[in-house]
Image: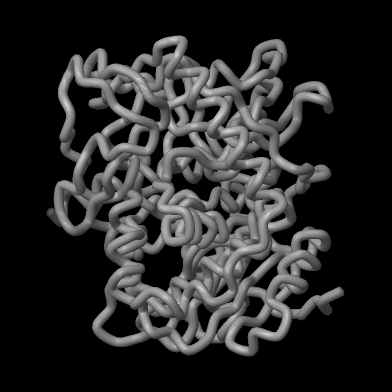
Amino acid sequence: MPQTSKHSFSIGGIHPAPHKESSADPTLLPLPITATIMLSQHIGAPAVPCVGVGEHVERGQEIAHNASFISAGLHAPISGTVVSIGDIPHFNGKPARAMVIKASEDDHTADTMGREQYWSTLRLRRPDRDLSESVDAGDIRRRISGAGIVGLGGATFPSHVKLTVSKAPEVLIINGCECEPYLMCDDALMQTFAEQVVEGTELMMKSASIPRAVIAIEDNKPAAAAAISAAIDNRHAITLEVLRTCYPQGGEKQLVEAVTGRRIPSGALPASVGAIVHNVATAFAVWQAVADGIPLIERIVTVSGDIPAGQRRNYIAAIGTPLSEFPFSLPEHAKVIVGGPMMGHAAVRLDAPVTKGTSGLTLLEGKARGPVQPCMRCGACLEACPMGLEPYLLASYGRLRRWDDAAANYVADCIECGSCSYSCPSCRPLLDYIRLAKQRSKKTRL
């Protein structure tokens, strides 16, 4: 078993209750009869439809092109007929442009059989260890772009853009920390498809001429760490680092510091200190695209929270599946969060679809937050902030609509991890005001 390092990031951090349970082999969620594919599921320009209403599409077929270099294409998660292209409500209730595909009974049966066969075979299959030697770097990047792969840790930045670099980074860091409470999708992926994750890591290394890689996992995932360690075997260019558990270890800047000991300057990217970071699920998706020619049309999603133990599980779900099709029973006065409780967003409707960035559904009893009290100047939010900011001050600027002052005090550096609000004994909505200040100060600069 790999030894745990004492490494972590040096500033702030908290230890919320993990609520991590056994991450068993993920279950195939049935394909939907009707799939809704949002045209903007990534950072950058929304994808542009390349099929029209009334047209029949096949599962895996491209249905929307990259609109620009910083964009990501979309592919049909099911075979069927395009019935509409237009605005539909997102899970937050706001309208967003989407394409709706409806399957016939024959389409659905054929897709289901082929999908079940693929995943059952994949669980038993040993990946080709020489795959990265048989494709060149440019071809890997083209396949990643053509498959519509984005960062699956939550940021959804188009992956081919990160890997198109003028100067090769010193190290590729594969993020398997999954520090957000309740979420277990990456843990399940690493346990079940460790060899594919490692092969995907090698493909990304070659695509950007990166000499070495580190797969980083927190020490509360021993089974995942053991599986990855066994899959790495004697590949000397890839190492495993098991990090001390601390939230938000999976934040890009925090992870780079934990692995390399280098702090990323304010306003800079990991490349400034010779690093590039991708999620373990992204590595798996890269392997699927290059090895099997499969685009990003489904992902693992965790369903957890205040629901019966038997309903807390990981599912392989098609992009475009309505959230309501996951099997769960809503708690009384339920709060449904898309993602985890720290960085996720509340859902106001469950007929909205799974997107590339949907890592989980956390269902919590609607417990009221304590009454907001005056700031007691305790400094808990300062101690918790992993970016070394002054959350109480930034929140005050947001509340008072002083956008320029917030910008001058580095509000743009906030990673919106929620550590400040979590640690505040006065129950002040610090992150809410900071997010507002961050958004408005950005618009002011533009």
The image shows residue 316, relative to residue 7, as above or below, that is above
Please state the horizontal and vertical placement of residue 424, each as a whole percent of the image.
Answer: 63, 47
Which of 222 and 434 lies nearest the eye of the viewer? Answer: 222
Q: Is residue 246 left or right of residue 83?
A: right
Q: Quadrant of residue 296?
A: top left
- Vertical arrangement, residue 395 with respect to residue 258, above or below: above
* Extreme residue toward the right, this view: 1
Horizontal relation, residue 149 to residue 331: left or right:
left
Which residue is more in the foreground, 116 or 421? 116
- Quadrant of the frame with the N terminus: bottom right
In this orientation, does residue 385 appear? yes
Residue 40 rendering spot, x and y as whole percentages: 28, 38
Residue at 15% x, 23% y: name it.
Answer: 52
**Residue occupying image coordinates x 56% and y 69%:** 199
Q: Position of residue 419 (x, y in %)?
A: 59, 52
Residue at figure coordinates x 70%, y 32% from the top left = 304
**Residue depicted at 59% across the width and 56% down the height:** 381
Q: How is the image coloured?
A: one colour
Instruction: Judge from the rendering whether residue 414 lies leftward or rightward of residue 113; answer left or right.
Output: left
Image-quadrant location for residue 175: bottom right
- Quarter where residue 196 is shown: bottom right
Residue 103 pos. (x, y %): 39, 15
Quadrant containing the C terminus is bottom left
Q: How many marks?
A: 0
Q: Nearer the viewer, residue 133 or 416?
A: 133
Residue 92 visible somewhere in the drawing: no
Q: Is residue 130 left or right of residue 137?
A: right
